[in-house]
Amino acid sequence: MTAGDQRSWVDQALHEHDEHERLDELERDAGGRRQLPLADPEQQVLDRIDRARRRRPRVREERITMSHGAGGKATQTLIEAIFLDAFRNPLLEPLEDAAELTVNATRLALTTDSYVVKPLFFPGGDIGDLAVNGTVNDLSVAGATPLYLSAGFILEEGFPVADLSRVVESMAAAAAAAGVRIVTGDTKVVEKGKADGCYVNTAGVGLIERDVTLGVARARPGDAIIVSGPIGDHGITIMLARGELDIEADISSDTAPLNGLVAELLNAVPSVRAMRDATRGGVATILNEIAKAANVGVLVSEDNIPVRAEVRGASELLGIDPMYVACEGRLVAVVPGEEADHAVAAMRGHPLGEQAAVIGHVRAEQPGIVQLKTAFGGTRIVDLLVGDPLPRIC
Amino acid sequence: MCLGIPGEVIELHPEQPDLAKVDVNGVRRMINIGLLVDDPPVPGEWVLIHVGFALSKIDEREAAAAMEFLEGIGQAYEDEIAALRASLIE
Amino acid sequence: MRFVDEFRDADKAHALAAKIAALCEPGRKYKLMEVCGGHTHTIYKHGLEDYLPESVQLVHGPGCPVCVIPMGRVDDAIHLASQPDVIMTSFGDMMRVPGSGGSFFDANAEGTNIRMVYSPLDSLKIARQNPDKQVVFMAIGFETTAPSTAMTMLRAAREGLTNFSVFCNHVTIVPAIKAILDSPDLRLDGFIGPGHVSTVIGCRPYEFIASQYGKPVVTAGFEPLDILQSIYMLMVQLSQGRSEVENQYSRVVPWDGNQAALRAINETMELRPYFEWRGLGFISHSALKVREKYAAMDAELLFQVPGVRVADPKACQCGEVLKGVLKPWECKVFGTACTPETPIGTCMVSPEGACAAYYNFGRMNRNRVPEAQVTRA
C-alpha cells in the first residue's frame, strides 16, 4: 500500500461508518422511535460505539497476520467474516468449542483443533499432551463423553524421530488417562523450514448422553460464573520456555483432561448453562463470548480470580494481563445463581477443581459488555484484545 | 513501556559486575545493574526493573514513610467513620 | 507482591478520596494533567476515576512515546527492516502502530523480520547468534528508556559487535510539557508528574512549571494509590495557593535523578535540533540521536531512510487528544472508524495511549454505573 492507498483506506472506513449511521438513523425514525436529545454527549458516543461493534464483521487486511491467530478480536472477525460467511449453516453458527450433531437420533459432539505450539516440549507437558487434552476438553465442555480421536501429523524434514516418539508416547498416555482412543490418523512431511518440527491436527467425537443443552447463548441475568482453578499457567509457561525472556520460574503448563471434572459438575448441577475451555485468549475472551452470545452484561471481581503468585509475577514483569493468557486445563462454567455454591463444592471435590471459585455474575445491565471490579475498588471494562503478546501457545 | 516493576536482588553475578539476579514473586531474571554503578545494590535490596535494567533502588524508608502516611489517612478516616456511626446511634 | 499490593489497597483509597473531596472548593472545577501514558493506563486499568469527585477532572497528556511517533518514522522503520539481511528488534508496543502502508505486523506478513524483544539487550543476543545479519533496534521511549539503549550501545562497543545498530526515536519530556503549557487551548491547574522518567532526570527539570507558570507538580508512582495520593498533594497545594514541585514517588525517584544513566545517555546520544512529534508538530531540542562517536551504530547513517513526512489522516485527532484538548471519546472517529482492531491513530493502538485506555478499560459512562460510584457512599 502506498501513501495514496493509505489515505483511501481511512476515507473508506469513515465513509462506511457514516453510511451505517445514516441507515441506522433512518431505521430508527421509520420505527417511530425518535431519538431523544440526550444531554450526555459521552453516552451518545458510547451508544454510537455500541452500534458500530454490533455490525457485521469484515476483514480489512489483505494478508493474514499473527493477530489473526491470537484468539482475540482479529481471530473472531476472521472466523465470522471468512469462515462462517462461506460455510454458514445452523450447526456451525453457535461457534461453540464443539458442534452438536444428531445422527439417527443419537446426539454427538464433533470438534477439531490444530497444535502449533513452540517449543514442542515444555514444563508440564508437550504438544502431544495438548493435542489429546485439548480435544478431550472441547468435547467435555459440550456435555459429551469423549470417545474417539483422530491425529494428523505434519512433520518437518529433519525432525528427529526420537522427538516424534516422545510426542506420540505422550499422546498415548494422555489418551489412556482420559479414557479415549486414537482411531485414525495421517502423516505428511514438508520441506525443511516449514512446520517448525511438528504440527498436529486432531478431530474428536463424543457422545452426548446426558439430557443437557449447553451453550453460552443460554446465560441469563443472575447466573454465576465459575472458573475451575488458577489462570494463566500454560501461556506463561510457554512464554518462559521459549527462552527469549531469560526468566526462570517454577511454573508449568496446566494441561489436563477435564472430562472427569465436567462429569462431577454435571452430576451435581444438571442445570449448568454453559462451559468453555479457557485456551487461547484466556478467561477474558470467554467472558466476552458469553456477553455477546447471550446479549447480557458480565461483572467479575478481580479479587475472586485465582492466579498463582509466580504467574502474577511474570505477568507484571512483562506487562501482560493474566486474564488474557491461555490455560489448557481450566474451564469456565455458567450456572444458575442459586446453584453456584453447589457447583463449586462439586468441582472442589475433584483434584483438577481444587481452587474452583465464583468469579462473577451475569446481569441485564450493559449488555454485551464485560466489567471488572478491580482489587483497588474501581471499575473497568474487559474487552477482547486484538492481537496477543503470546503467539502460538497452543 | 513506562513499566517498572519492583524486584528483590537475590544474587550478584560472580563474574560480571553489571549483572544481578532479581526475584519478582518467585519469578527470577538476570538483569543489568549497570545504571546503578554509583551505588550498586546488594542481595536483599529492592530495585525498580525496566526493560531488563535496574533504573533505581527502592528506598525502603521512603516506602515505609509513604505507607505510614497512607495508613494515617486511613486511620483518621476510620476514626471519622466510627464517630459518624456512633453519632447516628444517638 | 511487595511494593505493589500495599499501594493498591481499597480502604486507603476510600480515605484519600474523602480527603480529596473535602478539599474541593464549592463551585470550583479542577483540571489536572497526568503527563505520562503509564499513568493514564493505571488510571483506567484500576478504575481510579471512580474515587474522584465530579469537580476533579483528569486530562491525559502526551507522555506516550509510541503515540508521538509520526507515521513517517514508522514508514522509515519498515523501510529499514525491508533491507536485505536486516533483523529489526522492537518493543511489543510498536508492533501494531500503523504507518502509511501498515504496521510492523503487516510488514512481517509481507516478508520483513521484525522481532519483539523485552529488553534492548536481547538485540545483542540476536546479533551474536546471527553474525551474517544486521540487527537494528527500534529505540523508542522517553528518558526512562534512553539509558537502557545507551547501555546496550556501550556494551555492543565493548564486545566489538559490528552488526548491531540503533534507529533512535527517543524523545524528551520537558519540551512536550512546555508545549502543553504554552498551548492556548488548555487551562490546567496542576500536573501529575512523570514517574519513571523522573528516576532518570530527577525532579529539578520540572521546577520551571511551578516557578514560571505557577502550576504545582507532584511526581507520582504507578500504583493507583500513588496517583491518588499525588492528586491529594496537588489539591493541598491548590487549596493553599502554593505552586511547588513535590515528589510522591520518593521511594524510587531521587531528587537529582540517576547520574550514571544521564552519563550513559550523554556519552552515546545528543539532542537533535528539532524533531517532529505527532500532533504537536516540530519541537526543537526534543529528541535524541546517536552521537558521531558511535556513528557505526547509527542506523540512519548505515542505511538510507527515506525521511518522508507523512501527514496524519485528516480524520485523525490524535494531536488534540495528546495535548489533552479533546477527551478520547470526543474524537469524531473514536470507537467507530478508529478502534484497537482498525486504528487510525497511535493513541488507539499504543497500550499507553489515552484512546486505547479509554476504549479498552473505561468505555462506560461513570454516572450511570452503580459500581463505579465508590465515593458516593
Image (tube, coloured by chain):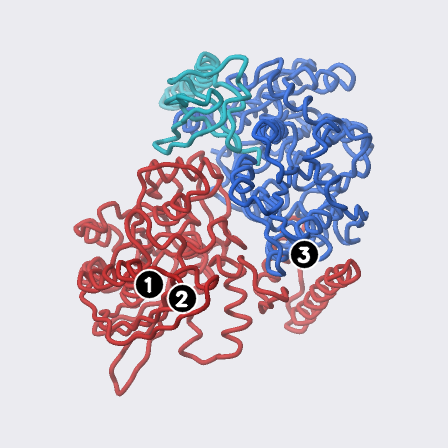
Chain colours: A red, B cyan, C blue
* Rendering quarter of residue B74: top left
The relative height of residue C322 versus residue B61 in the rendered view (above or below) is below
Image coordinates of residue A338 in percent, x first then y, are 27, 54
First in sequence: mark 2 or mark 1? Answer: 2
How far, Cα to Cα, is label 2 from label 1? 8 Å
Please state if C234 lies on the left or on the right of A271 as rendered.
right
Under mark 2, the amino acid is Ala
Q: Which residue is mark 1?
A: A274
Q: Which residue is mark 3?
A: C102
Q: Are marks 3 and 1 on the same chain?
A: no
Where, quadrant-wise, is the N terminus of chain C in this rendering? Answer: top left
Residue C30's tag is none
Q: Which residue is mark 2?
A: A217
The relative height of residue C269 versus residue A332 in the rendered view (above or below) is above
Q: Are marks 3 and 2 on the same chain?
A: no
Please state if C9 lies on the left or on the right of C34 as rendered.
left
Determine the residue positioned at 42% across, 76% down: A92
Determine the residue positioned at 79% across, 46% down: C307
Under mark 1, the amino acid is Ala
